[in-house]
Image (spheres, rainbow, N blue to C red):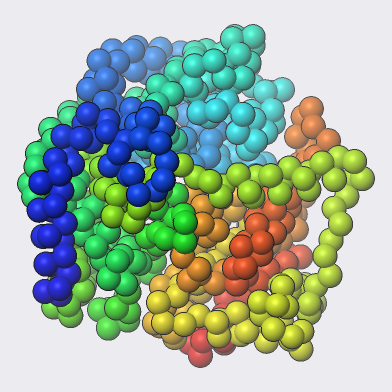
Amino acid sequence: MSAALEEAVAARLDRWAAEQVADRLWNRDGSLWAECGEKPEELARWLGWIDLPASMAARAGELRNLAAGVARDGYRRAAVLGMGGSSLAPELCGRLFDGMTALRVCDSTHPDAVRGFRGWATAVRTVLCVSSKSGTTTETNAFHASLAESVPALDFIAITDPGTPLGELARAQEFRSIVESPPSVGGRYSALSVFGLVPAAIRGVDVEAVLASANAMADACRRPAADNPGLQLGAIIGEAALAGRDKLTILTSPRLSSLGDWVEQLVAESTGKLGRGVIPIVNEPLGTAEQYGDDRCFVVVTLAGEADDGLAAVAADLRAGGHPVTEIHLERAEDVGAEFFRWEVATAAVGIILGVNPFDQPNVAEAKEATERLLAEYRRDGAFREPMSIVAEPGLSAFADPAILGDRPPTVAAAVRALVETVAAGDYLGVLAYVPPDPDAWVKLDHMRRAVRDGLGAATTAGIGPRYLHSTGQLHKGGPATGAYLMVTADPHRDLPIPGRVESFGALIAAQAAGDLASLQQHGRRVLRLHAADAAAGLARAADLVAQAVGSPVG
């Protein structure tokens, strides 16, 4: 870390100590974010997450009994039907912990992915957590509708806020259980609420140990700023962003990779607004210190007992090269509870530095509204009005706003090159793929990310749609205009109806992709959409084209 950044962080912590930021946070003082221009009382009502370590410890018996009943009744698998804040903490628990019950998340509306999930969930007896804070989440309701005709109501658990349509449905259909969360906890701050802990308990995680670690961190985060781990991390991330190091790069040991996904949503959706924000870079292929630009700030998170895989050496090289590097070490998997709380405090603190409201998501609704308009058109006409491609080749068509990417390119390769050439120093490339989230897709996305970093020295993000709409989607539209976006869509192998609806899953995901594209274009973002006849072939071709554009080999 440079001397200038160290001084800025120290000054920030001194200022926060003088302003009693820690005490004010615990007293739910919404004026901490006064610069964002919103009423303090409105901000304060979203601070219920502060109390979760203690309040959920008091509900540990309820969680134990629910999990014991599931085990007693012979369920061998568990699943979460949910998006964003309802799914990312459970996914982390499913990958981080060994348990009695296999745990899987369904958060893709791609027909091929939904069909595969249905096969997995109905092969053996599976308890299904239908998770939605509002109780109206489009994707969650579609997942439930797809399963409700073949799965008894007793196999469903509703996790929602009090008084939601989902709660009413669960009572009417006599779900196995309805578990309610405090309304004062926003979705991305809900990892330590029932949204995260019910699936964890069913998995067989020792939730009392998770909450004990969270409570210990909560106690530490009551301290004055200079000795407060949450405020310390927030000061580093926020001051680094002000200094031009706004690409928060999370490097983790293997079992903690999904922690990066959870942090990505928390930071991106909380800070990416008003043209400001921190860009989280997670699960990027590990490089050497020389391959990272000077717009990066690093946090390295490791778990005791895991193989190093070169992470410690890279961290040392990064620090020697002057990059800001923060290292966090977990002695056991249950310490993830402490990290949930640390990162929530840190993210709220970054909001203070950037002058944004870390608890709202004003631009998320735009893509949802655009999607609903397209679906209304589909319900009326039975089809979408497809825009004209700017150029095409066999199996692949390109769509873009010529005002952003210039005159009509002669080839698809030229269109990709035109997008890539807009990536300047301090910019990043985001790859947005509406394809089934299978391992091969992630391999191809990694190929693209490695090619861009090695060829341009630029940071990259990657997201599977529509999942990323509930994570980085806010940042893409409301954050800094430093992102260039390559969207890859594809025809499904076979469509899948949604019971009780006119639109199918194929129509739903097509509308979500088109709605997101329209929203990005409305904000003047640099975006190119490639549509493929086949997902695997389309991603492979896109990876080749990106590699060619940056002069870097694929693989």
- Quarter location, residue 280: bottom left
Tell me which residue sits at (11%, 67%) in the image: 7
Indicate left or right for 539 with 5 as reference: right
Q: Residue 17 or 237: which is nearer the viewer? A: 17
Vertical arrangement, residue 103 with respect to residue 535, above or below: above
Tell me which residue sits at (65%, 72%) in the image: 528
Tell me which residue sits at (64%, 11%) in the image: 173
Residue 434, percent across and down?
A: 63, 57
Q: Residue 107 or 457: which is nearer the viewer? A: 457
Q: Residue 398 or 173: which is nearer the viewer? A: 398
Total numbered circles: 0
Residue 428, percent across and down?
A: 46, 72
Tell me which residue sits at (69%, 28%) in the image: 145
Q: Residue 308 or 401: which is nearer the viewer? A: 401
Res 312 visible: no
Vertical arrangement, residue 429 with respect to residue 60, above or below: below
**The N terminus is located in which quarter?**
bottom left
Residue 54, percent across and down?
A: 22, 22
Res 291 visible: yes
Vertical arrangement, residue 314 with respect to residue 119, above or below: below
